[in-house]
Image: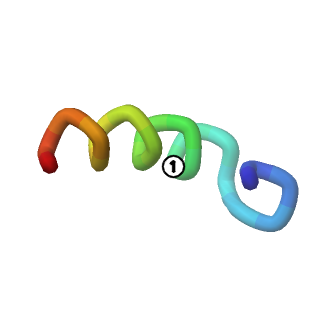
């Protein structure tokens, strides 16, 4: 997913979403 989006943002968004939910 970090191919079409910023690696740091996408990478951090994935684990953060799972933890936030």
Q: Where is residue 10 in the image (x, y as percent from the top left)?
A: 56, 50
Q: 10 or 15: nearer the eye?
A: 15
Residue occupied by mark 1? 9
- In this picture, residue 1 sits left or right of residue 18: right
Q: Where is residue 21 in the image (x, y as percent from the top left)?
A: 14, 49
Residue lying farthest left?
Answer: 20
- In this picture, residue 17 sits left or right of residue 5: left
Per the image, label 1 sits on a secondary structure element best described as: helix
Colour scheme in the image? rainbow
**Residue 12 lies in what quarter of the image?**
top left
Q: How many marks?
A: 1
Residue lying farthest bottom?
Answer: 4
Q: Identify the residue at horizontal 68%, vertical 43% (top origin).
A: 7
Point out the image quarter for the N terminus. Answer: bottom right
Q: Identify the residue at horizontal 13%, vertical 44% (top origin).
A: 20
**Residue 19 lies in what quarter of the image?**
top left
Relative vertical location of residue 13 with respect to residue 11 in this rendering, above or below: below
Q: Identify the residue at horizontal 86%, vertical 54% (top origin).
A: 3
- In this picture, residue 15 sits left or right of residue 2: left
Relative vertical location of residue 7 with respect to residue 4 in this rendering, above or below: above
- In this picture, residue 5 sits left or right of residue 13: right
Q: Identify the residue at horizontal 29%, vertical 48% (top origin).
A: 17
Q: 21 or 11: nearer the eye?
A: 21
Q: Residues within 10 Å of mark 1 (few under 14, many from 20)?
A: few
Relative vertical location of residue 19 with respect to residue 6 in this rendering, above or below: above
Residue lying farthest right?
Answer: 3
């Amino acid at each position: 997913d970090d191919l079409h989006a910023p690696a740091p943002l996408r990478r951090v968004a994935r684990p953060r979403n799972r933890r936030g939910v």
